[in-house]
Image (cartoon, coloured by chain):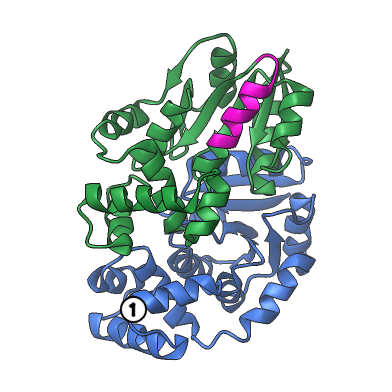
Chain colours: A blue, B green
């Protein structure tokens, strides 16, 4: 029996994904939670696999929290992410967080439960359509942290708010933003956000 | 037996929602499709209820296409939308399209199948958390069309692209955008998009 924890901020998608995994056979014990309950659920339930949607609002910081939860839990646990080919930046952040399963939400594998079981058994899985995105990810000039900060800025978060969310000082956030603007070739912060968005980095 | 058509661009959410509705009992015949197959599915399957996610990329134009599909199908069909309280603009567009069911994705009813059955029987349903959003929607100064155009512009679509998607001339799109900038109190297009975003109109 493999314990899976579905992490999603949208309650309906939590329920629906749970349903999809639950009805695939009786070898999966499927739980779900939002961002707030993540730490507690990781500690109490000791999931062997986490399933996370990279399109979740604020997914970089969620990956961060997930990393902390996995490190603090006794047995760790592997990571399966739900992504899309045109967002190489998010795939790269997931790779940096050590994800072992990559499922394309836009028409990848028909068998998400099989991916979860494979990853639980120590295997790896990637949908073909995401493999190319991961290749592209290597060409992104921004570092993972710069992408995190820029994607939160793109959501309208202030420097102070980004600093709080990522546990950084405001000065460090400003430095990351300045580097992101420079490396993306943008004229200013808004322009950098637009360029990064168009390129699918964030 | 009620035929339900789940419309979503994300294949994984289509499958997961189908699972959620299908396993709730045997009174629902659940089908799903993406934007491209919508017209054909509406004609061939004659669904009594459509389920649409308002967070779907380009949902205003999808609601538009859904309206056309419902009008062209012999028996019409009712509409249930999946929304969120902080996006009153999308709720208003859905109300304009004649939606009869409003389910909050962030923790609304636990029983989506019951909502679908109620709406199929000619009833109405709204989650309490969305009712307030719909009230707010009445205070949005922009018209439905201006919101449609502005939300496509916010996704980075060019005037020509918006015109094509909404079946309008480029001049008309420019007029809607100018009206949206004026009524939102924005300095220019980007500023109007930011203000409309912050207010949850788009």
Residue at position x 33%, y 44% in the image: B201
Magenta-tinted stretch: B64-75
Residue B56 in view, yes or no:
no
Residue indicated by mark 1: A189
Q: Is residue B133 left or right of residue A78?
A: left
A56 to B176, vertically: above or below: below
Residue at position x 48%, y 76% in the image: A196
Q: Is residue A70 left or right of residue A149?
A: right
Residue B107 in percent (x, y) is at 43, 36
Q: Which residue occupies the foreground of this view, B10 or B19? A: B10
Residue B181 in view, yes or no:
yes
Residue at position x 57%, y 28% in the image: B67
Based on the displayed image, in which of its 4 quarters is residue A54 positioned? bottom right
Q: Which residue occupies the foreground of this view, A153 or A10? A: A153
- The answer to if B99 sits in the magenta stretch is no
Q: Is residue B192 left or right of residue B73?
A: left
Main secondary structure along the magenta-highlighted residues: helix
Chain of the residue where label 1 is placed in the rendered structure: A
Q: Which residue occupies the foreground of this view, A67 or A85? A: A85
Residue A117 in percent (x, y) is at 76, 56
Residue farthest to the left, as pictured: B185
- The answer to if B73 sits in the magenta stretch is yes
B163 to B95, vertically: above or below: below
Residue A32 in percent (x, y) is at 55, 46
Residue at position x 53%, y 88% in the image: A141
């Amino acid at each position: 029996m493999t314990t899976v924890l579905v992490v999603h901020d949208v309650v309906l998608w939590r329920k629906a994904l749970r349903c999809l995994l639950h009805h695939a056979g009786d070898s999966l014990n499927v739980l779900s939670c939002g961002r707030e309950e993540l730490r507690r659920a990781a500690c109490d339930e000791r999931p062997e696999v986490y399933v996370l949607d990279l399109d979740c609002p604020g997914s970089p910081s969620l990956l961060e929290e997930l990393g902390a939860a996995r490190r603090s839990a006794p047995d760790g646990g592997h990571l399966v992410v739900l992504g899309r080919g045109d967002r190489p930046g998010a795939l790269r952040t997931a790779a940096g967080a050590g994800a072992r399963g990559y499922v394309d939400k836009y028409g990848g594998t028909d068998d998400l439960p099989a991916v979860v079981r494979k990853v639980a058994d120590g295997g790896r899985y990637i949908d073909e359509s995401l493999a190319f995105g991961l290749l592209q990810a290597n060409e992104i000039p921004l570092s993972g942290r710069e992408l995190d900060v820029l994607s939160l800025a793109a959501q309208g978060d202030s420097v102070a708010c980004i600093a709080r969310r990522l546990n950084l000082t405001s000065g460090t956030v400003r430095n990351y933003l300045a580097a992101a603007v420079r490396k993306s070739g943008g004229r200013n912060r808004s322009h950098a956000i637009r360029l990064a968005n168009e390129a699918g980095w964030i």
